Image (cartoon, rainbow, N blue to C red):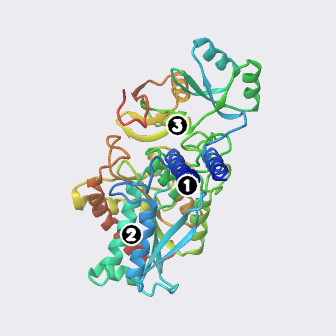
Amino acid sequence: MKHGFQLFGRTSVALGFAIGAFLLLGSRCDNNGGPGEPDAGLYHTYAEINDELHKLATDHPQIARVSTIGKSVEGRELWAIKISDNVTQDEDETEAVFLGCHHAREWIAVDVPFLLASQLVNQYGTDTTITRLVNQAEIWIIPMVNPDGHQYSVTTDRLWRKNRRNNGDGTFGVDLNRNYSYQWGGPGSSGDTYSEIYRGSAPFSEPETQAVRDFLQQRQTRALISYHNYSQLILYPWGYTNAPAPDEPLLQDLAVAMADRIRAIHAVTYTPQQSSELYLSSGDTTDWLYGVFHVPNFTIELRPRSASPGFELPESEITPTFEENLPAALFLIDWAIRQSNVTI
Amino acid sequence: MERFFLIFLSAILLIACRQQQPATTATTGLRKISYSDPQTVERVRQSGVKILVQQPDYLIVYSDSATAGNLQALAIETQPATERDLVQRLASIHFADQTELQKIINLGVDFWSVEGDSVIARVFDLHLEQLQQQGFTYRIMKMDASAKEDK
């Protein structure tokens, strides 16, 4: 009888653990949309980007180094990879920066900068142009500025755009590309927390934009591209006004030159234009970097052209999208190097 | 002893699961109102809250302290809304020029792209009402923009 009770007791405990595990998995499903690791197919998840950036640096310690520029609102690291010769030293070289994924659902905007990092590292010593650029510049790539939002897009809501700030009123998220301080609160942004273009409670209210700000303030950036999708556009400041930027001819020339290089690969057209030609928007990365530091910089809206397929770009287009954008990125790095002794 | 352990374990797990559910105790902000008759919708409108979403059996409203008081005065029961309740439509909105386009953007819609003379955007029912009031015409492409296929 005693033996029978022990057997029953052990079975109860085992059953308890089984129920517990089931409940725990169930709650994970509620929060993440599915058990186990998030899966974005051939697109990179946050965990995969983390692993692969570190692998690039481990495999190429002379030219690649991974560091964090800060943490997201949910505490994820914002990884940056620096690619340069003598990578552990802070040399007096031109710096070019590439940002990806301010907006969670724009998955291709993670893979393009990541593949750029991969190409620069893997072709160093083989490709003469890449070798020269890596030797002469310090190239920083931050492929996922909004890891919390991206994770949520992968696990729960494919069309999620903002970060995952709990606004305290039942709504979540701040549009990181409306949260920069230059002309913050102007047209094309919203003060409504439920809006997808909610600008946040104050300029730089979000840890993600604070991290980008603090990082760029410490660097001598000469050029920057922030990748988004979609519409196939190359946008340059200003966004908050229809007035031309002081360096509008230069910005336009650079945008046109990049569009030409993109078109030359797969005959795909990206339209170069002032950002406000699309519509007025305030508080974005490019206006801030240009307005405060006078750095020529661009938003590239990647494939596709139209709402079908919109944000859900087929995986088969990851490689061609990267291939066509590679020469534009290399061109801008090269331009930055050539300008390194010129004050704009 | 083992039964106590089992009960204790289950209680801990239940508490852990409950803590992971989104919970909003305040009556302001995003709220869900279940309804079965059109009169309720009309009463909600009278309260002055913003009706973000109107589904066949529930409303998602956004209330501030003043309008939350109105809801209470009208004895309209609300509960916290979940993110899944916050359905948005995918719409094609016609515009004539850049000024009109900017008016659409400034409503706070989720702009996707410009295609010809239309904006493709994800919108709340509140936005559709505002668009209509301002004289815009639109076509709803999907009733639930997040759904794989519209029904």
Identified at 55% across, 39% down, the residue is: B83
Tell me, for residue A233, which label it has, or none.
none
Disc 1 designates what residue? Answer: A3
Q: CA distance from mark 1 to mark 2?
A: 77 Å
Disc 2 designates what residue? Answer: A332
Q: Give the residue type at disc 3.
A: Arg
Identified at 32% across, 46% down, the residue is: A305
Disc 3 designates what residue? Answer: B84
Where is residue A22 shown, x and y percent of the image? Answer: 50, 48
Q: Give the residue type at disc 1.
A: His
Q: Residues within 10 Å of mark 2 (few under 14, many from 20)?
A: many
Q: Chain of mark 3?
A: B
Identified at 52% across, 31% down, the residue is: B124
Q: Residues within 10 Å of mark 1 (few under 14, many from 20)?
A: few
Where is residue A57 shown, x and y percent of the image? Answer: 42, 78
- Say if residue A76 shows up in the picture: yes
Q: Chain of mark 2?
A: A
**In the image, is A338 to the left or to the right of A179?**
left
